[in-house]
Amino acid sequence: MKLLRVGTAGTERPALLDPQGVLRDLSGIVPDIDGALLADDVALGRVREAAESGGLPVLDATGLRVGPPLARIGKIVCIGLNYHDHARETGAEPPSEPVVFFKAADTVVGPYDTVLVPRRSLKTDWEVELAVVIGRTARYLESAQDGLAHVAGYAVAHDVSEREFQIERGGTWDKGKNCETFNPLGPWLVTSDEVADPQDLSLKLWVNGELKQDGTTAEQIFPVGEVVRYVSQFMTLYPGDVINTGTPAGVAMGEPEPKPYLRAGDVVELEIAGLGRQRQEFKDA
């Protein structure tokens, strides 16, 4: 299923995109798309039955904002340097264990919402990423297969980053990762049964129409199931938590000087095969 949330920010309603591309209203079936729903097999079954019946009300998509596909996100765990090609372009050694950092849930915006370039920023960068949405409580998992079994679905994430704040301002990466609007998510949460192999997905990103990133999750150093297993050794993952699994080569930081960091007026578009497409205009904070 392709689950999404539509409407003005803060008042989104749950919806579903059917196989014909028709937007359907789920608000009569479930109150929202969140961790509680993803952990409830009975409720998900009702959604699936309603979708298959074809009787869900149609929503007019004209002018309707698409919000983040997941409400009440608990935490966003991010994996750094998780693609062989990205590590090469930045001159970094591939890590022996996953690099883990966090984004606050309040960085999440819709896939077509405006993204703000922080004040005094000179190095705002783009990163297309596969987001993993947890559907079952995960703690001390024993195998990568167990990790995949705890995934409810997948989505497109844009891990916007400010490289000076991240790398040159001391401390951890968090200062360059948690600026407002720095995690567009969606348009859909695609349930895991529709993603045959999360290690066989193409990722692309364009800046002002120019293709910058053209990668595949096959390049991940630590695949999705292993990432979930690994993270569960250090923290409990709950339904509705999100893991951003890293970005392939092609970021501004990896280009020759002068590096083409983002400015107000730039337009970024990104997509992952089967998971949808995003588009954001950048403006000054």
Image: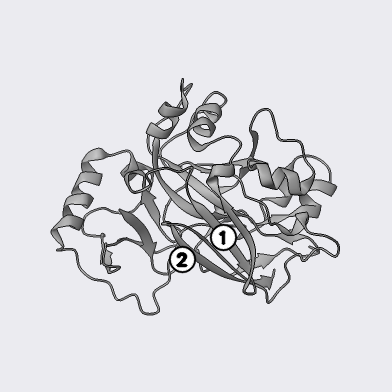
Q: Is residue 159 left or right of residue 70?
A: right
Mark 1 is surrounded, within 10 Å at the Cα level, by few (under 14), some (14 to 19) or many (20 or more) other residues, namely many
Asked which secondary structure carries label 1, the reply is strand
Can you see residue 49?
yes
Q: Residue drawn 26% across and 60% down? A: 27
Residue type at mark 2 is: Ala
Q: Secondary structure at mark 2?
A: loop
| Residue 154 picture location, percent across and down | 43, 48
Q: Is residue 110 left or right of residue 49?
A: right
Which residue was labeled with disc 2? 9
- Measure the alpha-carbon separation of dots 1 and 2: 27 Å
Q: Residue 91: horizontal and vertical position, in percent?
A: 80, 44
Q: Amino acid at mark 1?
A: Lys
Image location (x, y in percent) of residue 211: 63, 67
Query: Mark 1 or mark 2, which is nearer to you?
Result: 1
Label annotation for residue 12: none
Residue shown at the point (48%, 64%) measured from the top left: 277
The type of colouring in the image is one colour
Identify the residue at horizontal 21%, vertical 59% (top origin). 28
Residue that mark 1 sits on? 204
Compare marks 1 and 2 and give the one earlier in the sequence. Answer: 2
Q: Report if residue 245 is visible in the image.
A: no
Left/right placement of residue 40 relative to residue 221 reads left
Up-down relation of residue 14 to residue 235 (above or below): below
Residue 98, placed above or below residue 118: above
Q: Is there a contact, CB below 8 Å, between mark 1 and mark 2?
A: no
Relative side of 156 to 128, left or right: left
